[in-house]
Amino acid sequence: MRRDTLHLTLAFLGDIPAERLVEATRVADGVVAEPFSLTLDRLGYWKHNRIVWAGGESPPLTFLAGALTDGLRAAGFALEARPFVAHLTLLRDAHCVDVPSLPAPVAWPVREFVLAQSGNGRYEVIGRWPLGA
């Protein structure tokens, strides 16, 4: 993945009408969380969609994703029912037999979250919310 496309999805909205962006930003405005460091300490491979990913457990990240998801659902957004799995997509269309282990954990400082719109392999940041502010 290109550096400018690396991201970790907290909540996936899918295709929504432009006027609903105002509601989504209101929800994000109400999320309160502190900055933290996410430790990516393992690699994984999802054969069904051929994605290699890095992940790690993080209570602060789970809290952040939950606060955002709860607010979006309360505002009437239809979100996926499957549980949140923190993952950073590293490679798409991968064909792996074995996934190597991560040579060393990677600390990723989390200081903000964004609302991004995707299309044509690019992400456009629509809104940005600092943590701890």
Image (cartoon, grey):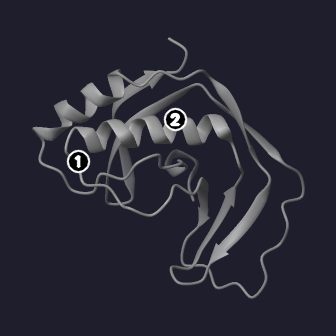
Residue type marked 1: Phe
When the figure is inspected, residue 47 is found, relative to residue 109, above or below; the finding is below
**CA gap, disc 2 to disc 1?**
17 Å
- Return the residue nearer the eye: 98 or 36: 36
Q: Which residue is at a point 41% across and 25% down the rendered structure image?
A: 31
- Return the residue nearer the eye: 128 or 83: 83
Q: Which residue is at a point 70% across and 84% down the rendered structure image?
A: 96
Q: Is residue 73 left or right of residue 68?
A: left
Please tell me the numbered disc located at residue 77: 1
Residue type marked 2: Leu
Q: Is residue 14 left or right of residue 66?
A: left
Q: Are marks 2 and 1 in contact (CB under 8 Å)?
A: no
Tell me where residue 123 appears, x and y as whole percent: 38, 47
Q: Is residue 18 left or right of residue 3?
A: left
Tell me where residue 12 appears, x and y as whole percent: 36, 53
Tell me where residue 64 appears, x and y as whole percent: 52, 35
Q: What residue did someone put label 2 on?
A: 64
Q: SS at mark 1?
A: loop
Please tell me the numbered disc located at residue 33: none
Q: SS at mark 2?
A: helix
Circle 2 residues within 10 Å: few <14, some 14–19, many ≥20:
many
Q: Which residue is at a point 74% across and 64% down the rendered structure image?
A: 43
